[in-house]
Amino acid sequence: MDIVTGFMIWAAEASTLGVLLWTRWFYERQSYYLTWGGGFLLHGAGIALIAFRGAVPDFISIELANTAALAGIGLWVAGMLQFDGRRVEPFVAIPALIWIAGMFLNPIRETFAYRVALFNVAAAVGYSVLIAITLYRQTGSTFTRRVFSGFVGLQTLSSLTVGVMALINQPEAFDSNSRSPWLLMTAALCFVASVMSCAKLINERSEAKLKALALTDPLTGVLNRRGLIDEFHRLQKNDCADKPLIALLQFDLDSFKQINDLCGHQAGDAVLVAFSSVGQMSLRGRGQFGRMGGEEFASILRVADMVEAASIAEAVRTTLKRQPLDIGQHKLTVTVSTGIAFAGAENANLDVLLSSADRALYAAKAAGRDRSAIGDAGEITIVPSIDRTEPDMADLDGEANRQVAALKRIAAIGH
């Protein structure tokens, strides 16, 4: 195989990949597909123009063609930045700028060997930047990223080898270097392998998104019931000696049906979204917050003791109450009742926690709503509220002794 044929095959492969990536963009609308597709098309066009040297003006087949091919590498780097959710930086233009700068030097512009060396050095720099971007702040599969970087690294070495050989042998045309076709074939194989490993990265990202969708509530963006169950099992396996308990906080928005009836279901949905934001903000990384269904939410977290769990529940409750929600033409003050259950992480049973938290939640509703209650070993304790001054309804039912016990057990909450 002569080197011109190799160039044309390379250009055809790159252009085909570019078209496929742009086609995929129409379905997923991810910016990195456009950027990568543009990079492959630009790189393919540049390589094709290089192959047509002699059939087209030198300015097109040399200056313009090599600039396009190297700009394509820069777009691959830009696409990887977008793939990782990072901003595209000006350094993606470095490979093309190295070539453009070299063309201002007469010895390089007029000598074939120097141009070959310059192009391959610029390409190697672009590949090196791509490797650094891929391995920096890794997300997703570390193994796949390393495999991809390994193949790009081989392509980098191939480019550097071609550049060094050009300086040593001083060829006057592509065909005068008998080893060039073999080096081109090696680079092409690395190129294909790099594309395949990059495709695996994309597939892993798609699988992760599908998994996230399966575990996420579509309206509020928080975990759904299945996601909370998975979080429970994850927390149960964690070794956290300073937080030996798993706490389940079950939230139920008070009088939610009235909000839907009076303000409409759109307002109800807006309230659900707003409460999800309040719940996540109040937890601040201490646990996961999710929607069980309807107006019921829950949080699963590791805690040191019952006081910590009650404190977090009260933080969510009071934050929601103190932040009136502007829903269209309505300004709503929404409250929530909370049932709390906890158990040792090693022996915790999710069904038992759910049952205990549900009973505590019912007691909080019966105590006048906008309250938190703790279920512990079959006993229900209403958490003293720091923002309420009226007597508890539970006291009227002869539960004064239990409230005294609650004050003793949760004395720190008032502070």
Image: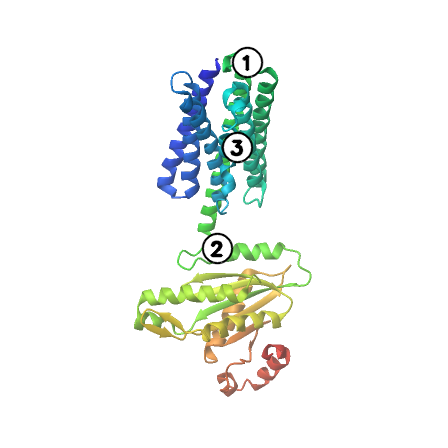
> Element type at marker 2?
helix
* Drawn side of residue 219 relative to residue 393, left or right: left
Contact between marks 2 and 3 (CB within 8 A): the answer is no
Choose between 21 and 175: the one closer to the eye.
Answer: 175
Mark 1–mark 2 distance (CA, rounded to whole Å): 62 Å
Point out the tag, 2 or 3, that comes first from the N-terminus.
3
Residue 303 sits in quarter: bottom right
Can residue 181 be seen at all in this image of the molecule?
Answer: yes
Residue at image mark 1: 177
In front: label 2 or label 3: 3
Residue at image mark 3: 98
Q: Identify residue type, mark 1.
A: Asn
Q: Identify residue type, mark 3.
A: Ile
Contact between marks 1 and 2 (CB within 8 A): the answer is no
Point out the tag, 1 or 2, that comes first from the N-terminus.
1
Residue at image mark 2: 226
> Element type at marker 1?
loop
